């Protein structure tokens, strides 16, 4: 408790409060704009870590992450174009509500639901982080190796529609992570001294998210403008409150655990929450025509999962979403080793972050409820100007990593890769996770084998490792059985492909 | 013989349209409504929705006017208006104009200004 209060003390200093404000405003803005998510924003902000302290940077990043979850719902509801993959489900009922003239209530239930879910999630983090940290500190290298393997398998098989595409992305990421001479041997450097230090994660992340997206938008520049539904100040009536509070709590209950699992991400819990609300509602006739429960539940779920993501990130150093993966590389760039010792070595930083989550959440409610119509105006920014700015910051960010022009060439190369991945519907998350976790996993493996003197059986010598391997086994069996039982019909595949490409 | 009106889904476009309708009825000529967008931002409030533009057309036709509507995504809105005037052999273009701040002039081009300067026929500038 003392630690938490100290955290608040640090998070409430004027500088850090300013960074929290900046983070939530930026986060909402990128959440509102489709195609630009918190992951891209963080990738562009990574160079900021060179000039500000770790506490300020990480507090700002957490603000961007939470803000993105709020902002995504605005576009979903008013435009039927989810700003974020986690808001896809919100669009189902939210846009229908807006079309029936209830946009103000939809925005209000989304914002208040997000606030409640985010607050509960943050309190859960305060309780769970120290306890889980105490547990995992006892784990050895073999268990870590197993956990990382699990998160690789989970992000590729559980998320996304196509296993094949997931694994293509994962192996691309692992290959990029291999470049360099960290192990003492030159791998994939093509005899070039500039590649000897490996490829910086900043360059890869900025290229895949920012340059790839910019090229993708440039290839589809002229589109018919979408029809936006005008809206005033969000508000809710008594009836709306009555119908919203249960879905908020249920959404939180789905969101947090899914965010905390290595197979996290907000897509699954939002979808589950929607299905549950549809089953439990007292107004089944309204579903499909704009039921408030269908907005309240999923929106709470996606914010709770954002909070849940922090748990494995802070205790294990395992990212479960692309945004978390980039936060992890930001921590690493400060020389902070994320993982079980983070809580012991950097407890000030962790508690400041945990306290700032609550502050960010409150700030978001304050700036989102009255300002929703203003945020919708962001959608009028012409794309050429917007993406020119993004490309400028992308180049700046990539150049400042090492101050060498070679990185700009790499940026362009990976940017083209990012474009190709969007074109062929290959998910981005496995690639980023592969780039960041690949070298770490190799480190754990070499450590484990060094301790055991090269005996491979050490990998399943710890009970946790055995449990994790059996979970992986179960997961793969379930996927295989599912694949065998119902081969995908031809027609839906094309629509699915189209959706992936659109994203 | 025809009148081309540059229509946008706001008060300026509305004012231009009202004047164009009055003139077209007086002279009993064809009215060409041009509503275009560059389509480079996600939302363009000046670009009328399909339903809105259909309603405008239906209203005018119910009035007994001969109306053609050009509702398109184009590389340049001013060029689209000028091209419409050329193709329809228009003898008048009607545009709505607005005040612009110095910063606005610096940042944004003006469709009305381009139409006024480059048109080969008379242009009527209407203020709401």
Image (cartoon, rainbow, N blue to C red):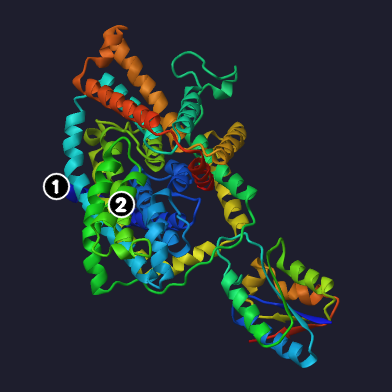
- Left of A31 or right of it: where is A239? left
Nearer-the-camera pick, A408 or A136 = A136
- Check whether the beta carbons of the residues at disc 2 and disc 1 lie within 8 A of each other: no
- Give how far across and how far down residue A443 sits, in percent: 36, 20
Q: Residue at x 31, y 33 (%)?
A: A317
Relative to the observer, which residue lies in front, A218 or A186?
A218
Could you tell whether B93 is left or right of A80 in the image?
A: right
Horizontal arrangement in the rendering, residue A73 relative to residue A466 (left or right): right
Q: Quadrant location of residue A170?
A: top left
* Helix, strand or loop for disc 2: helix
Residue A486: image location, x then y, percent: 39, 34
Question: How far is the residue under mark 2 from the one under mark 1?
Answer: 41 Å
| Residue hosting label 2 | A275
- In the rendered image, residue A498, in percent from the top left (x then y), is placed at 53, 45
Quarter-of-image position of residue A327: top left
Instruction: Assess disc 1: are there few (<14), some (14-19) or many (≥20) residues with their C-alpha within 10 Å of its C-alpha.
Output: few
Badge 2, how many Cα within 10 Å: few under 14, some, many 20+?
some
The tag earlier along the polypeptide, 2 or 1, is 1
Left or right: residue A183 compared with residue A276: right
Q: Which mark is residue A368?
A: none
Q: Is residue A142 visible?
A: yes
**Secondary structure category for the residue under label 1:** helix
Residue linked to disc 1? A2
Residue placed most toward the observer, B120 or A135: B120
Q: Chain of mark 1?
A: A
Find residue A480 and report its image quarter: top left
Considering only vertical position in the picture, is A446 above or below A74? above
Q: Is residue B99 visible?
A: no
Subunit under mark 2: A
């Amino acid at each position: 408790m003392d630690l938490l209060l100290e955290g608040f003390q640090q998070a409430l200093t004027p500088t850090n409060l300013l960074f929290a404000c900046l983070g939530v405003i930026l986060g909402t803005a990128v959440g509102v704009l489709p195609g630009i998510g918190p992951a891209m924003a963080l990738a562009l902000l990574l160079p900021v870590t060179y000039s500000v302290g770790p506490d300020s940077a990480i507090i700002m990043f957490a603000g961007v992450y939470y803000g993105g979850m709020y902002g995504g719902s605005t576009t979903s509801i008013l435009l039927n174009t989810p700003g974020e993959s986690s808001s896809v489900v919100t669009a189902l009922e939210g846009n229908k509500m807006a079309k029936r003239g209830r946009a103000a209530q939809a925005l209000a239930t989304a914002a208040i639901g997000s606030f409640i879910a985010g607050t509960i999630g943050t309190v859960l983090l305060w309780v769970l982080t120290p306890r889980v940290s105490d547990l995992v500190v006892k784990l050895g290298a073999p268990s870590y190796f197993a956990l990382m393997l699990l998160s690789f398998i989970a992000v590729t098989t559980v998320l996304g529609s196509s296993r094949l595409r997931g694994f293509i992305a994962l192996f691309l990421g692992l290959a990029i992570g291999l470049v360099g001479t960290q192990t003492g041997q030159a791998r994939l450097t093509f005899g070039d001294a500039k590649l000897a230090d490996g490829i910086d994660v900043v360059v890869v992340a900025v290229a895949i998210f920012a340059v790839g997206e910019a090229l993708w938008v440039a290839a589809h520049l002229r589109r018919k403008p979408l029809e936006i539904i005008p809206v005033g100040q969000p508000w809710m009536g008594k009836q709306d409150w009555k119908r919203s509070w249960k879905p908020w709590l249920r959404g939180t209950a789905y969101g947090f655990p899914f965010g905390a699992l290595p197979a996290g991400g907000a897509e699954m819990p939002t979808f589950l929450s929607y299905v549950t609300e549809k089953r439990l509602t007292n107004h089944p006739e309204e579903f499909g025509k704009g039921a408030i429960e269908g907005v309240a539940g999923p929106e709470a779920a996606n914010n709770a999962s954002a909070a849940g993501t922090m748990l494995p990130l802070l205790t294990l150093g395992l990212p479960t979403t692309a945004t978390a993966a980039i936060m992890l590389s930001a921590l690493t760039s400060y020389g902070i080793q994320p993982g079980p010792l983070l809580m012991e070595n950097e407890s000030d930083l962790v508690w400041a972050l945990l306290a700032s989550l609550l502050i960010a959440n409150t700030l978001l409610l304050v700036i989102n409820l009255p300002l929703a119509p203003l945020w919708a105006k962001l959608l009028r920014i012409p794309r050429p100007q917007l993406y020119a700015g993004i490309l400028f910051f992308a180049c700046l960010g990539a150049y400042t990593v090492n101050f060498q022009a070679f990185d700009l060439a790499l940026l362009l190369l990976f940017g083209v890769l990012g474009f190709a991945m969007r074109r062929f519907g290959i998910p981005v998350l496995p690639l980023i996770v592969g780039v960041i976790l690949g070298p770490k996993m190799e480190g754990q493996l070499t450590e484990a084998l060094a301790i055991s003197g090269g005996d491979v059986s050490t990998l399943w010598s710890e009970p946790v490792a055995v449990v994790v391997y059996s979970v992986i086994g179960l997961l793969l069996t379930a996927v295989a059985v599912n694949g065998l039982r119902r081969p995908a019909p031809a027609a839906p595949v094309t629509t699915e492909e189209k959706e992936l490409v659109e994203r | 013989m025809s009148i081309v009106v540059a229509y946008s889904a706001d008060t300026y476009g509305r004012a231009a349209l009202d004047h164009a309708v009055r003139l077209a009825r007086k002279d009993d000529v064809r009215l060409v409504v041009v509503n275009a967008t560059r389509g480079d931002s996600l939302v363009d409030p000046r670009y009328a929705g399909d339903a809105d533009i259909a309603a405008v057309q239906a209203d005018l036709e119910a009035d007994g006017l001969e109306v053609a509507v050009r509702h398109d995504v184009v590389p340049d809105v001013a060029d689209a208006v000028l091209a419409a005037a050329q193709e329809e052999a228009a003898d008048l273009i009607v545009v709505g104009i607005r005040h612009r701040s110095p910063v606005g002039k610096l940042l944004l081009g003006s469709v009305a200004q381009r139409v006024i300067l480059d048109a080969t026929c008379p242009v009527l500038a209407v203020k709401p």
